[in-house]
Structures are given as structure tokens and as C-alpha cells.
Amino acid sequence: MSQSAVDVPPKGGFSFDLCKRNDMLIQKGLKAPSFLKTGTTIVGLIFKDGVILGADTRATEGPIVADKNCEKIHYMAPNIYCCGAGTAADTEAVTDMVSSQLRLHRYQTGRDSRVITGLTLLKKHLFSYQGHVSAALVLGGVDITGPHLHTIYPHGSTDTLPFATMGSGSLAAMSVFEAKYKEGLTRDEGIKLVAEAICSGIFNDLGSGSNVDICVITKGNKEYLRNYMEPNPRTYVSSKGYSFSKKTEVLLTKITPLMERVEITEVGEAMEE
Amino acid sequence: MTKQHANWSPYDNNGGTCVAIAGSDYCVIAADTRMSTGYSILSRDYSKIHKLADKAVLSSSGFQADVKALQKVLKSRHLIYQHQHNKQMSCPAMAQLLSNTLYFKRFFPYYAFNVLGGLDAEGKGCVFTYDAVGSYEKVGYSAQGSGSTLIMPFLDNQLKSPSPLLLPAQDSITPLSEAEAVDLVKTVFASATERDIYTGDKLEIMILKADGIKTELIDLRKD
């Protein structure tokens, strides 16, 4: 039995053991497996009573749309939600993991989770993987110390901001925020602005599209507005429809039993206890 | 010592999809109107369909700068032909000219994926499909561009082209009516727009018949 090829480093973190072999394979012409990226527009803003998060719903695999209506606003705690851009598997895994860690922490402390706790857990994890976990996040929530909004980059750096955008559509969305954001927005004004920013990403960025998801978090309350706006209905549906001729023929129907009933005869002594 | 690779490419892909279907007395050529680069949109209203002669219309996706250059060459060669022969070029003649023009630049190709549609001498529809260096084939229908892999299997299923290897040689022209072919094209583009990020905005459909050319413009998803 050969020795195990991958050794887990003693203190956790990324194991670089296979990197040389991967490089050699790529040089020899092997195509690395493609990642499902969410090529996204995600935004967050702080308004008078709390935080509003927004996201589009398109997941892309290169130039193809893999999921027309995926969920990019992830649950972290009853009062904290996180939008994720980048590799879909990475954002899902990292938000699920930290969500579990926060819950265990709540049981241990007997208190509601704070946004900075989630922030520190996420940034420590992402930094230890040196940017290989491709997750760019917008973390927002309302805790005992008030409303908070943070951005987290794949390498582990964070920013604390009154309004933030991430993803391939972040420039399109940020242009809307920079033009129209002001402090002390009401709930309806905030939702309208977030929807406008996401729509700007949806229509001007090819990596974003389909519908707008919104999450409003205030003190003691949260509202997850899935598919708040659906500005992209299918443009043409043929009235007569299309049929597909059955090209498969059944050539033979035969059932072959693979295993025959086996007779078990007791031979030898009973097993020792 | 590993080969040094260029850090600059002369090509860019502006995306888009082109489709053409040949009928018994018509030819439908369609293309979306979105021009893009990377993840950005350059234009929502850029026509990829160009009339080369009365009976020959070219639709090209790929690198639009190369497409423009290719059209200039074809237009001037067509003008020379008209001076020399006192008539317009027929569609099969234009098809051969396009193939030769593309192969002329075999070692620095035009990054253009072409579909040529038109009417032949008898007035029947004909479609020619090309690769980037001029290999071409007369077919009953074709799709090229970023959405072609999404569209071709569906056209294959609905238009059931007979194998070109069969004897006696069978016509690949579809028996569908003009309205049915246009409906098929609209459905196919609406579907491709759902799943291909480079296809969308508007659909331009050009219908060639013996008495003239009709153009239709349909809205597609803009996201």
C-alpha cells in the first residue's frame, strides 16, 4: 500500500503537496476542471432601521447559464445574512460552515450572534487558504451593537462600509449607489435603491441576470424577499409548441436474474466469542 | 526552455449567434443584435446580417473588426464581378468566393464564423456554413456563434436533415412553410438567450424571397 499522497498540515490550512503535480499535468495538456462561478452582482446598504442586502440570481459556467434562479443570499444567523460571489461551491461551503460555528457559539454563550463574530470567523478561514477559496462576500446584520455591513475578499481582507457591492457586476451597481445613496434612507427608499443597483448589474453585466433577491434585516426582525423583482420573462413562447418524435425502440424485453438463491449449510464450529 | 507566449492577442470575441434555414422558395437568415466584449455590452443594436448581393446575404459572428474587413473585401470583389460579367453574383458563386477569401488568410485567419444564405438559380433556398478558414458545405440549415451549440441539436431534431452520404443525393431543404420556419427561429433564439450570456437584446430576422427581402425585429431578454 503506497504512502498517503496528501498530508494534512499539522495546524490546518492549505496543503500545497499536489500543486507541482497539477502544474505538470496542465503543462502536458490536461484541462483543469472548470468551476461554477456565480459571476454576480451582490450589494448591501445600511438604512435608518437596519441593513438591506440584494443579489441577482444567475449562476454561470463560462459563457453558459447553469442556473437561472439560484439563491445567493445565505443564512448565517437569525439576524445575520451573507451574500456570496465567486465560486458557488466555495461561497456555499464557507457560509454553511460559519453558520454552524455561530450556532454552536450561541449555545455556548447564550447570546445572539454578533456580525463581527461571523466576520472574524470568515476572514480567518479565507486567509488561511491564501485566496484559493474563491469567495467574495457581503455580510450584513443587526445585533445588540446596531446594524453592520462588511465586505470580505477571497484573500481575507475586510472593509466596513455604509454601502457595498461585490461580484462582476459590482461596478454597474456601485455607480447607482454612488449617485443615489444618502444616510438615513427609509425602508422603501432603501429597497428601491437596492433593486435599482441589482437591475443595473443584471442588464449591464453579462455575468449577472434573471431576478432580484432582497433581504431586509432590522432589530429583532428579518424579511427574505425571494424573487422580489422578475424583470426578465421569457420573450417568446411558440403558440403551437414542438414535439419530439420517439426515436427509441424497445428491441427486447428480458429479465435475467443475476443472482441465484444460494443454500447456506452450516459447516464447522461456531465462532468463538 | 519553454516557449515564450505572447501577452497580447490580435483577436477579441464580440459574441453573438447566427442562424439560417433554407426553404423551398425562401431563405431565413437571423442573428441577435448584441455586441459584447468580456463581461460588458458594447451595443444592444448591432446588425450582424449584411447583404452582399441580391440573392446572397451573409451573417457573421466572432470578431466584428475582422467581419467588417471581410465584408469590404467581398463587396469590392463583387463590384469587380459585376463590371466584368454584367450581372450580380449568384449565391453558390458568392459561397465559393467567401471560401477562397477566408483561405487566403489561412495563417492569420479572419476570426469570423459565417453563415451565407440566399436563393440559387432555380429560386430554392440555399445555406452555406463555414469555419474560420474557409471550409464550407451546402446545408439545409445552420447555426454559428456562441449559441450555436445550444441551437444546432434542436434544429437537427426538428428539421431532420438526411445524411449527405446517401445516394441518390437528397435535398436538405426543409419542407416547412415560411411562417413555421420563422416561428422556429424565434423559439430557438428565445431559448438560446436564456442560457447563453452573449446572446440577447434583439433578434433580427431577414427573409429572402424571389420578389425581395423582408426584415423583422423581435425583442429578446436584455440581461
Image: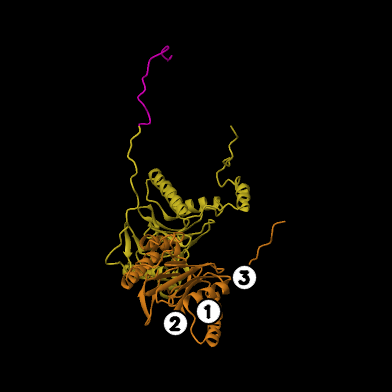
Considering the whole magenta stretch, tell me its main secondary structure: loop
> Hue of chain B?
orange
> SS class of the residue under badge 1?
helix
Instruction: Work out whether disc 2 and disc 3 sit on a shared chain.
Output: yes
Q: Does A140 appear in magenta?
A: no
Q: Quadrant of the C terminus of chain A?
A: top left
Residue that extends furthest to the right in the rendered view of this protein: B1
Image mark 3: chain:
B
Q: Which chain did the renderer colour yellow?
A: A
Where does residue B14 sit, x and y in percent of width and height? 50, 71
Q: Amino acid at mark 1?
A: Gln
Q: Tell me where the magenta segment starts and ends, as one range.
A: A257-273
Q: Residues within 10 Å of mark 2 (few under 14, many from 20)?
A: some
Residue ID for mark 3: B108
What amino acid does circle 2 point to? Asp
Q: Quadrant of residue A243?
A: bottom left
Q: Quadrant of the N terminus of chain A?
A: top right
According to the picture, the residue beneath numbered tag 2 turns out to be: B54
Label number found at residue B71? 1
